[in-house]
Image (spheres, rainbow, N blue to C red):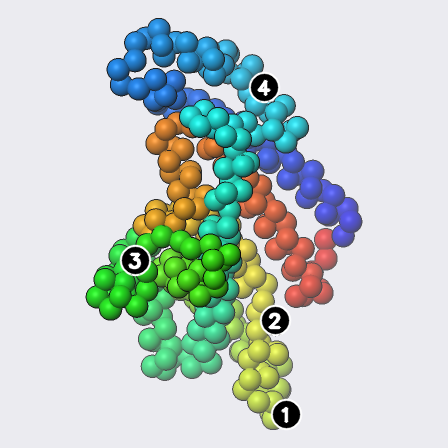
Amino acid sequence: MGVYILRRLVSTIAVMAMVGIFIFLLLRLAPGDPAAVIAGPTATEQMVANIREELGLNEPLPVQFVHWASDVLRGNFGASVFTGVPVLQLLSQRLEPTISLSVLTMILSVTVGVSFGVLAAWRSGGFVDRALATFSAIGYSVPVFVIGYILIYFFAIQTRWLPVQGYTSINQGVAPWFLHLILPTVTLSVPYIAFIARITRGSMLEVLSEDYMRTAAAKGASPFAMLFHHALKNAGVPILTVIGISFAYMIGGVVLTETVFNVPGIGRLVVDAIKNRDYPIIQTVLVLISGLYVLINLLVDLAYTLIDPRIRY
């Protein structure tokens, strides 16, 4: 196990190095010039050239990469080319809304998705199974922004039960904080609930057909014990994999959802940075997201051994 963890850590460092090179080249080779954006539409060529010189954009790409990589390894992610504020300070100011939305979304997605999957497997072929299959198909195929606008129309504009947009910090009260997050959380959760429910149903159906499940039923085990003690535990590996992948891919959905609901999180910060070609912010967020994705995959692999002791590395 120790060798496996060490091997995964080494591979993680190699992957992050390749990701860093890819992100750096992708931004530098993409169309657009941050110096021209900073200078404005009325700037002369000399003004743009001066800004490029000041930002170090005239240096060869390998030199720029070495400077950036060495700063990152020292924990210096640079500052916004527009405001001059350190990137880590900007991220810390936007962290609370994004973490709040992500955590609530995962709690709702896992709780409802696994419950729906277990219920559909238990009632396989019946009305409940068909109804949940229809919900999963719709929830997984409809774009997030469409779900968001539908929820806004019914629960914010028509009934005025919930805020349309914006965010309130938890320091200003749990109730207003929670009310502002209900619609974004439900919007972002729908596709993940559908995805987790489908995988859970398939895994549960496979386990429920095993001989030991019929033995448990013959011994008088209750449906609750059969489903959640015997079946769900043995079907846990694929479900855990899906949950890990969903959490990693959720970042993309967070960006879109924060834009729709005007939540001032990291997603909105990235969107604004992309518009302005603010390299330090974009690079830092992409590197941190990639690192989070790799870390989640590592934790999921390690968690396999806790669910199924037969898995050894």
Q: Residue at x 69, y 41 (%)?
A: 9
Residue beneath label 4, please? Answer: 67
Residue beneath label 1, please? Answer: 219
**Nearer mark to the viewer, of 3 and 1:** 3
Nearer-N-terminus badge (3/4) = 4
Q: Residue at x 69, y 61 (%)?
A: 305
Q: Residue at x 65, y 59 (%)?
A: 303
Q: What amino acid does circle 3 point to?
A: Val
**Nearer mark to the viewer, of 4 and 2:** 4
Q: Which one is nearer the viewer's eye here, 233 or 125? A: 233
Q: Given contact means CB atoms under 8 Å apart, are the residues at marks 1 and 4 in contact?
A: no
Say few, some or many: other residues with alpha carbon within 10 Å of mark 4 (under 14 / 14 to 19 / 20 or more).
Answer: few
Q: Given contact means CB atoms under 8 Å apart, are the residues at marks 4 and 2 in contact?
A: no
Nearer-N-terminus badge (1/4) = 4
Helix, strand or loop for disc 1:
loop
Q: What amino acid does circle 1 point to?
A: Lys
Q: Given contact means CB atoms under 8 Å apart, are the residues at marks 2 and 1 in contact?
A: no
Nearer-N-terminus badge (2/1) = 1
Residue beneath label 2, please? Answer: 234
**Nearer mark to the viewer, of 1 and 4:** 4
Q: CA distance from mark 2 to mark 1?
A: 19 Å
Looking at the rendered structure, which numbered label has been put on residue 173? none
Q: What amino acid does circle 2 point to?
A: Asn
| Residue 228 picture location, percent across and down | 57, 78
Q: CA distance from mark 3 to mark 4?
A: 44 Å
Direction right: furthest residue: 2
**Nearer mark to the viewer, of 3 and 4:** 3
Residue beneath label 3, please? Answer: 164
